[in-house]
Image (spheres, grey):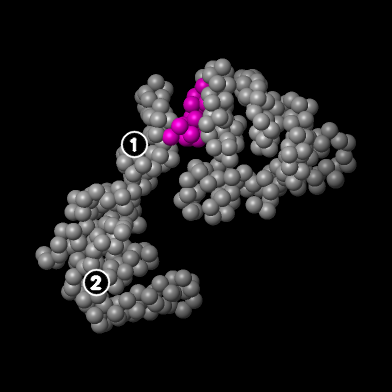
Amino acid sequence: MSFLSRFKLPRIKLPDFLSSPGDRNILTPPQGEDPGERDRRAAISALSRAVRNDPDSVEIYLALGNLYRAQGDIERAVQLRSTLIARPSLEDRLKARVYFELGHDYKRGGFIDRALQAFEQARRLSGESDEITRDTARLHAESGNFLQAATLFGRLGMRIPQAHYLVRHAQEVMQSHGEAEARKFLSKALKANQSSIEARQELIGLAARNEDWRATRKRLDEALKTVPADLRFLLLENLLQLSPSGSSTATRTEDFRVQLCKAVLPVLEAQSPDLLLQYYGALYLLRCNNTETANAWLAKTMVLSPDFWAARLALLDIAMKEQQLSPVFKSQLEFFIEQAHHVKKFVCRACGLHRKTTFYRCPRCRSWHSIAFRTSLQD
């Protein structure tokens, strides 16, 4: 049984703003309104009539507050909760639910401190609850208090978000207290979740930025053995974006890319044949202008998956630079290749969202580590 389903609320007096006839026009759907908004207004109107006819039905009363919140009318939602909380006869255990809903009202309105206070009141009145702890953790995460978010997710045994927010905190510590202090939190992240892609990736990046290529190879090898196989491409995608620390000239950047390639390639060569590992190996080779070897790595991907569009695009890009083409044909081909490079390469396995950049938690369905590389354009 969930926290929200444990309570049945008693009779309540209807507030003036719901029983006043002058307010009913607010609930009348304006012409040309979005269908979803129109349906919500219709539901508000129906629930308002139900509450006026039966003030004992407090569940409907609270549902009405939730509709106001969904509509963005935070002031009315808060007024509904406050009316309930102000009742002297309302038991503490029942107030907990109201405070919980009030916390979500404030969160929806962007009042983070008030939302946290309301969640804390709900916790004090009802005792520890997974629902309250989880939603408080999410609120801390959204407000940038990553360490507290990690602590609360740890209490819930949610190891993936716990490790994720420990890494986020480590990144902040890196800016203020330096690498040594940040490593402590990265170690805690790995203790929470040995296969944490975020922690492994951060440690590899630290070694590479310090140009400690031996450590880079070692950490990448460890990560490829530990991280789930369907997420290993994230290590290589984000490492590919690295640049040398501090100010850098074109020559230093080029040297950094060459050294990074030399560190990464032996590790990839030691792995069992894998489509994305072969593809990313080719990208590293292309970054340091080793076209001939990159071509060979891309050819291997065609053996593994002839329909792999990203490898075919890279092969076409190489071939175009090697062929003698008429100016008109070359211009047209360059246009289509440039457009193809804008294809959203990543997809959420849970909800199908397409993105151009990587993510650890889907921005639409909020699932963790559901990202995949679109090896087929049908994905």
Instruction: Left or right? Give the position of 183 relative to 6.
Output: right
Which sits earlier in the primary sequence, circle 1 or circle 2?
A: 2
Q: Residue furthest left?
A: 88
Above-or-below relation of 274 to 66: above
| Residue 346 at x, y percent in the picture | 60, 46
| Residue 325 at x, y percent in the picture | 87, 39
Name the residue nearer the viewer: 293 or 171: 293
Taken as a whole, is the magenta stretch helix, strand or loop?
A: helix
Q: Residue at x 22, y 57 (%)?
A: 96
Q: Residue at x 11, y 65 (%)?
A: 88
Q: Residue furthest front?
A: 1
Task: Please name which of the two marks, 1 or 2, marks the residue nearer to the observer.
Answer: 2
Disc 2 residue type (three-letter): Val
Magenta residues, as a range?
193-207
| Residue 90 at x, y percent in the picture | 15, 65
Q: Which residue is mark 1?
A: 147
User: Does 327 appear in magenta?
Assistant: no
Name the residue nearer the viewer: 187 or 354: 187
| Residue 197 at x, y percent in the picture | 50, 35
Please say whether residue 310 is visible from this viewpoint. Answer: yes
Q: Residues within 10 Å of mark 2 (few under 14, many from 20)?
A: some
Q: In which quarter of the view is residue 224 placed?
A: top right
Disc 1 residue type (three-letter): Leu
Classify mark 2: helix, strand or loop: helix
Q: Residue at x 53, y 29 (%)?
A: 223
Q: Which quadrant: the N terminus?
A: bottom left
Classify mark 1: helix, strand or loop: helix
Q: Which residue is mark 2?
A: 58
